[in-house]
Image (tube, rainbow, N blue to C red):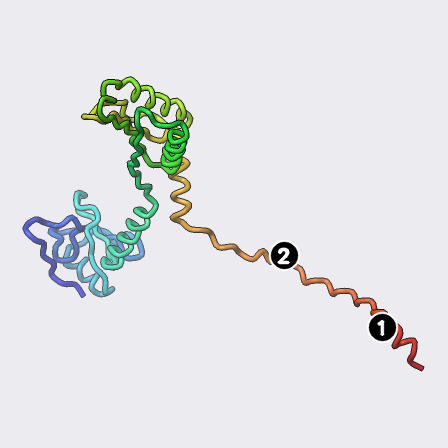
Amino acid sequence: MIRDQRTSRGGSRDQRTNRRIRAREVRVVGSDGGQLGVMPLEAALERARTEGLDLVEISPMASPPVCKIMDYGKFKYEEKKRASEAKKKQVVVHLKEIKLRPKTEEHDYEFKVRNVRRFLEDGDKAKVVIQFRGREITHKEQGTTILQDVIQDLKEVAVVEQAPRMEGRLMFMILAPNPKVAQRARELARQAAAGPSPKKPTGDAKPAAPSAPSAPSAGEQDAQSATP
């Protein structure tokens, strides 16, 4: 049923429908996609009413405006559903952080670099921070050396998005996955969002061959030979 629909003072981003359409004449597209031609608005509304559907303005800037007869509630539901599915397939990039010290031990350094590599291969960015304490701040070159080592060790998967810089007692840089790694992470995320595809039966399965009769045991042979 067509109802008078009014908008708030701020207006609406949705298409105009039914009595909200302002044009006197409209070009109408039927519910089956067929062209119904130009007709007065009242005639178009009556056509939509007889089908139990809505008249929706889809091209307001055309002359005359183009309207389509459709189930507007169903259209909005499907549009929202499509947007939700698209959002699920989007890759959300996080900024992960690891902290190092100017005198970080080698095994600790290697462990944290492996973590940064994992972050990047997952499609995330990494903030690598050198934290200075006390008089360590007088040896900033040690922090620069460590960050350069990180860049060198991850050169096949990372690009420097933000070069090393100081902020108080912290020196940091931001690494991002290179285009090839980022593309692979997006593909894996889309596959994970889609879920595993169900396996279909091949239809080529053959019935199992009948098993050969087993040979009689020694006891059975003795019993058979003793039978008159």
Q: Is residue 182 visible?
A: no
Which quadrant holds residue 148?
Answer: top left
Which quadrant holds residue 169?
Answer: top left
Q: Secondary structure at mark 1?
A: helix
Amino acid at dot 1: Gly
**Which is more toward the observer, 99 or 68?**
99
Location of residue 83 in the rendering, given as x and y in whole percent from the top left corner: 28, 49
**Which is more toward the observer, 12 or 175?**
175
Residue topped by disc 2: 204
Tally of numbered discs: 2
Residue topped by disc 1: 219
Above-or-below relation of 223 to 27: below
Amino acid at dot 2: Asp
Residue drawn at (42%, 45%) of the image: 191
Left or right: 210, with 35 as reference point: right
Location of residue 140 in the rendering, given as x and y in whole percent from the top left corner: 26, 19
Q: Secondary structure at mark 2?
A: loop
Q: Is residue 55 visible?
A: yes
- Residue contact between numbered discs 2 and 1, judged by CB atoms under 8 Å: no
